[in-house]
Image (spheres, grey):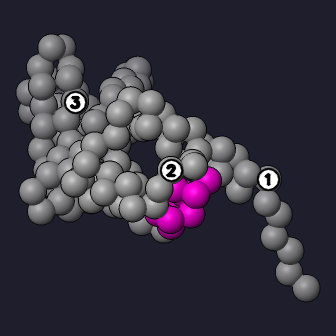
């Protein structure tokens, strides 16, 4: 009998020398660090297996990023262009993405909405070859 898939929120944020990930499962905070999202994903699933006896194959994550982790994971995003589309100063977004400053809830939402809107626009793009 197949086990039901479990979806858990994984918060990914700036850590020393890389990224830090954390989940809260059954009121237990489980965290680890890594150099990239794949590394953190694997480590957290291992810890969930060890401490909660969850089959890693039945666990998937909803990723929630701080600004540093977002621009680290999606390093193809041009910070200046995202800032322009969001209507905020590029220098300020660079400070957010480096972890020097942290955005307010409203600023973070504005950036998130902008990235989602840009992604929606890209989904509509069609490429042809001659």
- The secondary structure that most of the magenta stretch takes on is helix
Cα–Cα gap, marks 2 and 3: 31 Å
Choose the circle earlier in sequence order: 3 or 1: 3
Q: Are marks 2 and 1 in contact (CB under 8 Å)?
A: no
Q: Are marks 2 and 3 in contact (CB under 8 Å)?
A: no
Check the image and report above or below for 86 versus 8: below
Q: Estimate the x, y position of residue 76 in percent, counting from the top left.
A: 48, 68
Check the image and report above or below for 4 versus 105: above
Which labelled disc corresponds to residue 124? Answer: 1
Name which quarter of the figure residue 128 lies in.
bottom right
Is residue 7 located in the magenta-colored stretch of the structure?
Answer: no
Which labelled disc corresponds to residue 23? Answer: 3
Check the image and report above or below for 19 versus 55: below
**Residue located 35% across and 33% down the image:** 104
For label 1, the crowd category at 10 Å Cα-Cα, with few meaning under 14, some 14 to 19 and many 20 or more, is few
Q: Nearer the viewer, mark 3 or mark 1?
A: 1
For label 3, the crowd category at 10 Å Cα-Cα, with few meaning under 14, some 14 to 19 and many 20 or more, is many
Q: Secondary structure at mark 1?
A: loop
Residue closer to the observer: 111 or 6 = 111
* Segment tinted magenta in the rendering: 77-85
The residue pinned by badge 2 equals: 88
Q: Nearer the viewer, mark 2 or mark 1?
A: 2
Q: Estimate the x, y position of residue 1 in percent, counting from the top left.
A: 40, 20
Q: Is 102 situated left or right of 118 in this image?
A: left
**Residue located 57% across and 38% down the image:** 113
Is there any visible trace of residue 32 in the rendered image? yes
Choose the circle earlier in sequence order: 2 or 3: 3
Name which quarter of the figure residue 130 lies in.
bottom right
Q: Secondary structure at mark 3?
A: strand
């Amino acid at each position: 009998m197949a086990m039901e898939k479990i979806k858990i929120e994984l918060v990914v944020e700036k850590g020393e020398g890389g990224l830090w990930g954390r989940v809260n499962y059954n009121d237990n905070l489980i965290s680890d660090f890594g150099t990239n999202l794949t590394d953190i994903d694997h480590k957290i699933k291992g810890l969930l297996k060890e401490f909660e006896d969850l089959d890693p194959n039945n666990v998937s994550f909803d990723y929630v990023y701080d600004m540093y982790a977002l621009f680290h994971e999606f390093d193809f995003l041009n910070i200046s262009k995202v800032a322009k589309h969001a209507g905020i100063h590029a220098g300020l977004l660079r400070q957010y993405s480096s972890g020097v400053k942290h955005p307010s809830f409203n600023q973070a939402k504005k950036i998130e909405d902008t990235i989602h809107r840009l992604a929606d626009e890209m989904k509509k793009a069609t490429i042809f070859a001659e």
